[in-house]
Image (tube, rainbow, N blue to C red):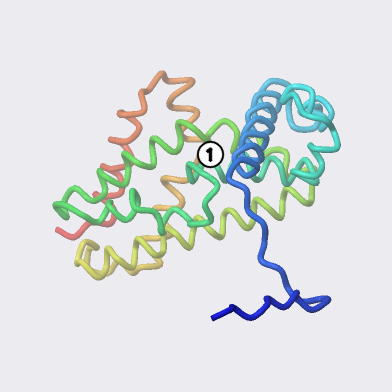
């Protein structure tokens, strides 16, 4: 039997998107180079003084590639922070990631210690660049919008954790999910506290984690 001829696609019909693993890997490498250059220059020279041209030169890409990849400096800084917080470019927020879901696995009386250990590691890799962005948001309206969205996402993540703590009976009587989420947000998300303790007082990451764990457990944990 002879197979019937394949009809050509009708004009205007949708085509399957072309995907090249090699091209995708090259694009990822470019984005990583741009983000690394941007973070280094932002921390060295400040957000306002750092130009997109300087970042492109540092990253070894053209300005055209730079702007095609990240249209604005605020968007670039947002991406630098988001990838640093989450660990990669995947869209899942912290509460959706396996390492953060694992906080709820294991002895319940150690849940705040597990949370504090992960949070301290996050602070170690992000506190300086987040502090810079917080300051720069006062002069860049676009960056201020990114900051506000990031704060809302962080609060939603912590509310999801607080809901699970309530479900498992880990919260003290009288402590609501909202109270727990707000407390964790205020205590564990303060980059100023982390930087003062680790840069001015020479605290280690482990000692900072112990403080967060002890404070949250004393404030929120069920007897």
Q: Quadrant of the N terminus?
A: bottom right
Q: Nearer the viewer, residue 136 or 176?
A: 136
Q: Residues within 10 Å of mark 1 (few under 14, many from 20)?
A: some
User: In terms of image quadrants, where is residue 74?
Assistant: top right
Q: Nearer the viewer, residue 40 or 204?
A: 40
**Total marks placed:** 1
Going 70% across and 24% down the picture, which residue do you hit? 41
In this figure, which residue is indicated by the disc labeled 1?
A: 84
Q: Nearer the viewer, residue 185 or 41?
A: 41
Q: Quadrant of the C terminus?
A: bottom left
Q: Position of residue 162 (x, y in %)?
A: 34, 63
Outermost front residue: 1
Q: Nearer the viewer, residue 41 or 23?
A: 23
User: In terms of image quadrants, where is residue 9?
Assistant: bottom right
Q: Position of residue 64 (x, y in %)?
A: 85, 37
Dot 1: element: helix
Going 22% across and 63% down the picture, which residue do you hit? 172
**Would you say 167 lies left or right of 3 here?**
left
Q: Is 3 above or below relative to 114? A: below
Q: Is 144 above or below relative to 35? A: below
Q: Position of residue 121 (x, y in %)?
A: 39, 35
Going 52% across and 34% down the picture, which residue do you hit? 127
**Would you say 98 lies left or right of 140 here?**
left
**Would you say 148 lies left or right of 10 here?**
left
Q: Is 72 above or below relative to 156? A: above
Q: Position of residue 148 (x, y in %)?
A: 64, 56
Going 79% across and 79% down the picture, which residue do you hit? 10
């Amino acid at each position: 039997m002879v197979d019937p001829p394949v009809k050509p696609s009708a004009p205007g019909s949708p085509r399957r998107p072309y995907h090249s693993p090699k091209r995708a890997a090259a694009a990822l490498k470019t984005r990583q180079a741009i983000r690394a250059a941007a973070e280094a220059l932002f921390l060295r020279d400040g957000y306002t003084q750092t130009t997109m041209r300087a970042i492109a030169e540092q990253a070894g890409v053209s300005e055209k590639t730079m702007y095609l990849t990240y249209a604005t400096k605020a968007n670039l800084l947002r991406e630098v922070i988001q990838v640093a917080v989450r660990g990669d470019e995947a869209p899942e927020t912290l509460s959706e990631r396996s390492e953060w879901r694992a906080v709820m696995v294991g002895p319940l009386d150690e849940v705040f210690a597990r949370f504090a250990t992960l949070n301290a590691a996050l602070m170690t890799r992000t506190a300086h660049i987040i502090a810079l962005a917080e300051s720069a948001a006062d002069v860049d309206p676009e960056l201020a919008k990114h900051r506000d969205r990031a704060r809302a996402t962080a609060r939603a993540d912590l509310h999801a954790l607080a809901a699970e703590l309530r479900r498992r009976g880990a919260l003290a009587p009288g402590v609501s999910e909202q109270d727990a989420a707000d407390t964790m947000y205020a205590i564990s998300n303060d980059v100023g506290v982390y930087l003062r303790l680790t840069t001015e007082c020479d605290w280690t990451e482990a000692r900072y984690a112990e403080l967060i764990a002890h404070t949250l457990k004393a404030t929120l944990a069920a007897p």
